[in-house]
Image (cartoon, rainbow, N blue to C red):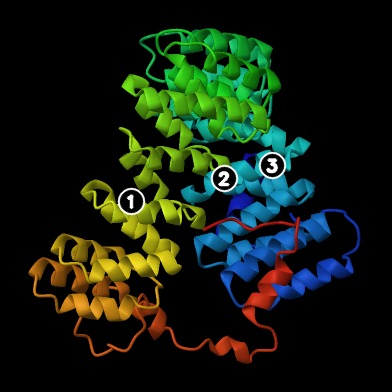
Amino acid sequence: MAGAGSGRALTADLFGGGSTRECSSDPGAAPTVAAAKWRERYRSARSEDETCAALGHLAAAEGASAVETILEAFRSAKRPYVRECAVNALGETEAPSAANWLAEIARGPERELMEPAMQALAKNGSGAARSALLEFAHGDDPRLRQQALLSMGNAGWPEAAPLIVGALEHATPRSKEDLLSALGATRNPAAVPFLMKLAQEDGFSNREAAFDALGEMGGPEAIAFLTKEAGGQKPRYAIDALARIQDESARSALLELARTPGKAQVKAMHALMARATTEDPRVREEVRANLLRMVGEGGKNGDAALNALSQDESPEGTKALASIASGGGNYASEAIRRLAGLDDPSVAPVLLRAFESGKEDVRGPALSGLADLGGPMAERALADAVRSHDPKIRKEAASALVGSGLSGAKSWLETLSRDSNRDVADAARATIVIGRGGDDADDESTDRPLGTSVIAQADGPDDSSADDESPDKLQAELRPEGRFVPCAR
């Protein structure tokens, strides 16, 4: 870690205008062919994304000797996005000097770069980076101290756990939530008793965050505690935490709770259906059958059971919802509304029957769902709706055609826009305006295809296609599988 005097010099170089050559001359291997390629890509980049991708690949390909180019990009960048990408690229290098530069960026005048610089230090993980973060964590600046603890914890450094526990004593409620999340990410089992104590304190405003941290922490002690708490009066936090633990014993605990009548039963079923790790089809079949039974019985668990079934995105889950929708019970209407939001052609017959049933509470959603799915059944239903003698149905047809790609959509909307019923005509005109990206219905561009935005039309042809390499081709080359991905906007 650079001392105070050299730190001021480094900061002046970064944010002022001195030379970076002396500070970034790390010993390393000679530049490789790949490094030369990415350096050239950086020099010829035509967009911020290309610049960022090239810097990241350069850091991975060349390592220590890439620092000077990355710093050049940092100092010359006019936009924060590229500066942040340069910070991330520094974190990718193994250069001893990278930690010093990142530390100076973290304490520098651009406050928005503090967090990415700290995160890059934590990701770098070198001895120099660890020393820098620990110095910040023990320092006097509360902003730097807090961000150092968060960065170390979220990067999974076990040694950050006792420091975070100490910081929680004087932290604000908002800061406590962030610190508890970072504490869980350390996966340090020594912190489990502390988190258990917080989770049991009724007056603690961040109880949910403490439970979430236990779920992130995992391990036998945390699972046993969460299982016990899930059987209490307020099981939701504990069950949500159990669902986060990617462990067979956590799944077994949830399954046992799902089989035991009580407050936690439906919540445990909901968690099991939503769990990506629940791969055993027998478990899902058992839970699904119990949820269907609960929906059929109605009562206080019916709504929760239907919500849990909606978490099942498998074909069997869709069939379960379709069986509820076709059953005509208390939850048929709600099941139809949920089916209408699925992008699954297999639900079209159920939606068509719902529309043809004439029930007002499901007719509109069913028609909208069909319009989104498209196909012969949708064409049939919309054609019938447009010709209906009931103005309410014609209005539902007009609303359902927003953004529709059905072949008859344009002519149907034109017909409905001249409807004798004012509400129907207004709904159709509104749909036409939405389809045109917000222009007035009598805009001169009346021949623009339905659903085409004015902005998209005004962009014009991409003159970059005349270049030797198209941007799409270049981006594909800059981001090969398994390599560095630049910071997201």
**Percent coordinates x, y for residue 87 in the rendering:** 63, 53
Q: How far across and down, in percent of the image, does residue 349 sit?
A: 43, 55
Which element type, helix, strand or loop, lies under badge 1? helix
Q: CA distance from mark 1 to mark 3?
A: 54 Å
For residue 354, the mark is: 1
- Mark sitting earlier along the chain (1/2): 2
**The residue tagged with tag 2: helix, strand or loop?**
helix
**Label 3 sits on residue:** 123
Q: Nearer the viewer, residue 323 or 398?
A: 323
Left or right of 178? Residue 335 is: left
In front: label 1 or label 2: 1
User: Residue 266's x, y, as percent?
Assistant: 45, 21
Of residues 103 and 215, which is closer to you in this image? 215
294 or 358, which lies in front? Answer: 358
Measure the alpha-carbon separation of dots 1 and 2: 20 Å
Residue drawn at x 82%, y 66% is 35
- The nearer-to-camera label among 3 and 2 is 2
